[in-house]
Amino acid sequence: MSGGTVRVEFHGVRGSTPCAGPQYARYGGHSACVSITAPGERPIIFDLGTGLTPYGELLGGAADGFQATALLTHLHWDHVQGLPFFTPLHHAQSALDVYAPGQVGGSVGEVFGQMMRPPFFPITLDQLHGSVRFHDVGCDERIIVGDALVTARIVPHVGPTLGFRVDWHGVAIAYVSDHGPGCCGGRHDETIVDEVLALCDGADLVIHDAQHTQAEFGAKRDWGHCSFDFAVRVAREAGARRLALFHHCPTHGDDVIDRILLDASDASDRLGGPTVLAAAEGMKLDFDRVGVR
Ligand SMILES: [Zn+2]
Ligand SMILES: [Zn+2]
């Protein structure tokens, strides 16, 4: 394995639905999409929400011949709507391998194709010039992507949903975008399942659902998300180094997220937990194997 900086870049940090307006200027309104890159290797993309559109624009002239791997947590709208607008796929030489949870009623490619077709959308997947290759993922899989080891585990949410961990050049990044332990399976709202702890174990960065405040959570507990306090507990119990609050609620403007970040940082300090940050569009985080345990 060769060394080098692993860069995490946030292109969409919003959950549920994209949103626009001056109150979202600093954290951004695009839905879930995060890229990870390492020198000389193909990018890995977490989720295909509307943040994928500005990511495609960023790639600009390098778009033709673009090759990447996407790790798709699940098929909810806020995680897939960017795919048709990802400009690299408008070029014949480009290809995207998409790993996503197996579905009831067909392969993930077939089920995705049912969403992306008239009358819901003007064109089908086949009409994109680039190639999109879907791969069904089971409840506990390890996938080799270049020099990266990807681990996929089932996460409690509404419908089949995966979380991912990427171990790359000695750096571990965990991605648990949608996590509502009490929404299914008869679990308590505060239960942290072993699958999630395994994904986040000692990670350099955990990117985690932080959709609600505690005050909001009660009325929305079956929506499949959690409070930011719960995200802090997950990262603390897993021994993670940093926590990025993610999947921000579309009703939370910048000032609300500022306050959530302060409260989450205080909670983490009290627990002896990790450094906390609030994910924002355009935020870049670099990790080197130097100093990584
Ligand atoms: Zn979501
Ligand atoms: Zn969801």
Image: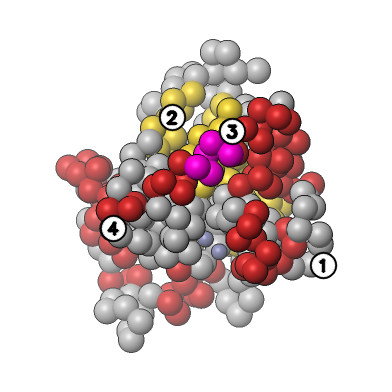
Q: Residues within 10 Å of mark 4 (few under 14, many from 20)?
A: few
SS at mark 1 in the image: loop
Residue 58's spot in the image, x, y percent? Answer: 24, 43
Q: Nearer the viewer, residue 155 or 146?
A: 155
Q: Which residues are magenta?
A: 259-263
Which residue in the structure is indicated by mark 4?
Answer: 21
Which residue position holds label 2?
Answer: 285
If you read the primary sequence from the N terminus, does the residue marked by circle 2 or circle 3 appear first? 3
What is the crowding at mark 1: few (fewer than 14 residues within 10 Å), some, or many (at least 20)?
A: few
Residue furthest out toward the top: 290
State which tag comes first along the sequence, 2 or 1: 1
x%, y% of residue 79?
46, 61
Instruction: Say the numbered circle drawn on residue 265.
Output: 3
Q: Is mark 1 within 8 Å of ligand 2?
A: no
Q: Secondary structure at mark 2?
A: strand
Q: What residue type is disc 2 on?
A: Leu
Residue type at the position of mark 1? Gly
